[in-house]
Image (cartoon, helix red, strand yellow):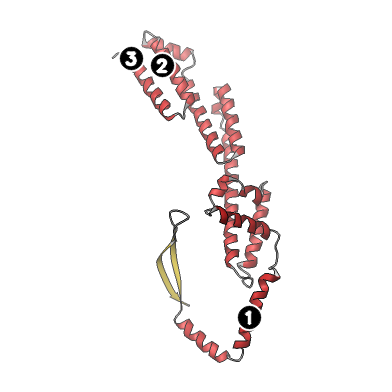
Amino acid sequence: MNKIQRTVEYYQLLIDKFQKTGLSPEQLRIYKEIKELVEGCSSYEEIQSRMKNEGYWESPGQALYLDRMMAQKNAAKENGFVELEALYQSRYDEVKADSSKMHDASYSSKAMSILAQYSNIMDTMFGIYTEYCYHSSANVYDDLSYRGSLNNIREKHALLESMGTSFSEVSKNSYYREHIDLSDSKYQLFLTTVESLLNKHEPDRSEVEPFEETLKVAWEKLKDKKAEVQRIGKLEDARTRKSFFLAVPPPDKNGSYELINNEQEEF
């Protein structure tokens, strides 16, 4: 096998690889053209001359760059990142028209800025979800969890608005939805609850009254038994310990958490 035959074989291997993946159409096109060029030459010197004169020194690098832009554009589209998708498409078009543009790295700072915003939105959205969990498990007399979570939800929503979006808009985006590990029905409950909490500053009377009534009944039964209550309390304190666990999450949303590394200390 002479040098030209080995070169043809080399480019055929590249063609086979890119045909198999189907993810690099620009590189596939370029290497097919180069293979045809090589097959039409009678010497290695002719190959080098024609590749240089016909632009094939730079075109493989341009093709690689274009395929990468298209892959990033498709990934942005799959994740619902409209602004990022448009940026990669614009970059693709620029470099397709002029290969020298691929040496201009200014677009990278734009892409990083957009990605940072998506990350900040994700952090804020997940923060709202965390506060929703705190609020759902709190009672109206727990200021830290109940009123605190109300304030935090509103603050985080204001942060979303400062980034040019809103809870309602973000919650419809499939990318952010996939990061909140809830079934569809529970996710809808999360959305409905948060939307109602955004304008809520104090507990409803319907939330407070059952607690107040229970407290009244309990007080009537216990107010003359202070010494007995204190005695029982001391007994309970003596046998009560705080427990700390490492919670290992399940592999999917239908599994159960595993609690390990139980550490205990007395109150």
- Judged left or right of residue 127, residue 16 is left
Q: CA distance from mark 1 to mark 3?
A: 92 Å
Q: Amino acid at mark 2?
A: Lys
Q: CA distance from mark 2 to mark 1?
A: 86 Å
Q: In the rendered view, tell whether residue 9 sits above or below residue 24.
A: above
The mark that comes first in sequence, 2 or 1, is: 2
Q: Amino acid at mark 1?
A: Leu
Label 2: state its secondary structure: helix
Image spot of residue 111 (x, y percent): 58, 38
Q: Contact, CB < 8 Å: mark 3 with mark 2?
A: no
Q: Which residue is mark 3?
A: 5
Q: Amino acid at mark 3?
A: Gln
Judged by depth in the image, the label closer to the viewer, 2 or 1, is 1
Q: In the rendered view, tell whether residue 41 sits above or below residue 184.
A: above
Q: CA distance from mark 3 to mark 2?
A: 10 Å
The disc at residue 21 is none
In the displayed orientation, state which residue is furthest to the front.
185
Which one is nearer the viewer's eye here, 182 or 125? Answer: 182
The disc at residue 215 is 1
Which one is nearer the viewer's eye here, 41 or 248? Answer: 248
Mark 1: few/some/many CA within 10 Å (<14, 14-19, 20+):
few
Where the N terminus falls, by quadrant? top left
Rendered residue at 62%/63% (across/down)? 149
Q: Which residue is mark 2?
A: 35
In the displayed orientation, state which residue is furthest to the top.
42
Mark 3: few/some/many CA within 10 Å (<14, 14-19, 20+):
few
The mark that comes first in sequence, 1 or 3, is: 3
Image spot of residue 65 (x, y percent): 50, 28
Q: In the rendered view, tell whether residue 23 sits above or below residue 249.
A: above
Q: In the rendered view, tell whether residue 52 sits above or below residue 231.
A: above
Judged by depth in the image, the label closer to the viewer, 1 or 3, is 1
